[in-house]
Amino acid sequence: MAIEMAIEYRALGKTGLRVSTLGFGGSEIGYQAVAQKAVDKILNTALDAGINVIDTAECYADGEALIGKAIARRRAEVVLMTKCGHAPLGSASERALGYAQPDWEPAMLARSIERSLKNLRTDHVEVIQFHSPPLATLRDGRAIEVIHKARERGQARFVGCSADSDEAVYAVESGAFDTVQISVNIADQEAIELVLPRAAARGMGVIVKRPIANAAWRHGKQPPGDWYTRPYWDRLQALDYDFLRRGGVEDSVAIALRFTLGTAGVTTAIVGTTRPERIAQNIAHASAGPLPGAEYEAIRARWRLVAPRDWTGQR
């Protein structure tokens, strides 16, 4: 059945790529070992609905391969993005080939890009991104040269950097990247003042990860056991937003997503899922448009009141 809600599209900065404001993030399907049949259904549902952004990374276990197979016949419809770096978390078969060199060693990065293209069953991606690089890597011209050469060879149309805090500021101000991927959500607002205005000034496309703060509130008063969600759960206990107390999980997801998508400077927000039905739900939330101004500002005001300086962007 077709999804009736409208998808909004924006230009991804000066790249000129036309992207859906709601994208698909591929970490969950890889890390949770989702079956190929389910991935096929999830991604075809997303594409049928007008979502055209798919973001993944080599380190998401077998996520790239799952995506590559699922979109093989619809590649032309996809603004495909992947990331290099953090290679040791790749699939078992790839680890067996030997990740003996440091993640950010130039030859390693070049091979990572080649593996990603093979996994994704394509000769190029729209955007190749560094994946949470340390500041030293960003300052290393040899690493930057690798992805620039990938662009020159046609392996990527544009280059980007997924980073937060000081690393994101450096990446933006370096002028070396076309896009930046960064965390922005109700529990992670450092980038709204620190990074987004700088990116806008340079005409960069902004891809937001973690746009619903990992829905950390769904754990209630029981802290989550995983390192990825726990920081946001801790923050939300202190932020104590009234909408999280009065609303159900789905209403809270809607407010969180609309907050992120309504933040000035955001081009697209990638949301991952292992359930096809979540695609329609997320589109419905996004289609509702930005939060009313007063509601948006109340969330910002609560952050300014509560957030200490060490609540920096989460990788």
Image (cartoon, grey):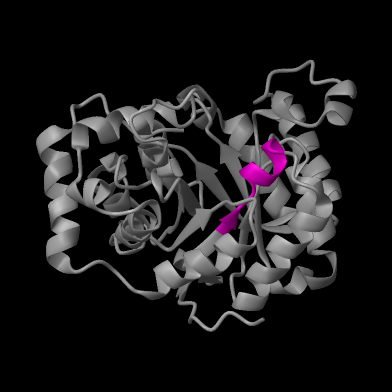
Could you say which quadrant of the image residue 112 lies in?
Answer: top right
Residue 207 in the image: state x and y as whole percent: 47, 54
Could you say which quadrant of the image residue 157 lies in?
Answer: bottom right
Picture residue at 19% right of the left edge, 59% below the top: 296
Q: Is residue 264 visible?
A: yes
Q: Nearer the viewer, residue 224 or 222?
A: 222
Residue 282 in the image: state x and y as whole percent: 48, 64
Residue 127 in the image: state x and y as whole percent: 62, 55
Question: Is 72 rendered above or below residue 140?
Answer: below
Q: Is residue 174 visible?
A: no
Picture residue at 69% right of the left edge, 34% below the top: 59
Q: Is residue 296 magenta?
A: no
Picture residue at 72% right of the left edge, 23% below the top: 88
Q: Nearer the viewer, residue 251 or 123?
A: 251
**Count of numbered badges drawn on the protein:** 0
Residue furthest to the top in view is: 100
Q: Quadrant of the N terminus?
A: bottom right
Left or right, 112 with respect to 198, comes to right
Picture residue at 75% right of the left edge, 17% below the top: 101
- Magenta-tinted stretch: 24-32
Residue 139 in the image: state x and y as whole percent: 49, 29
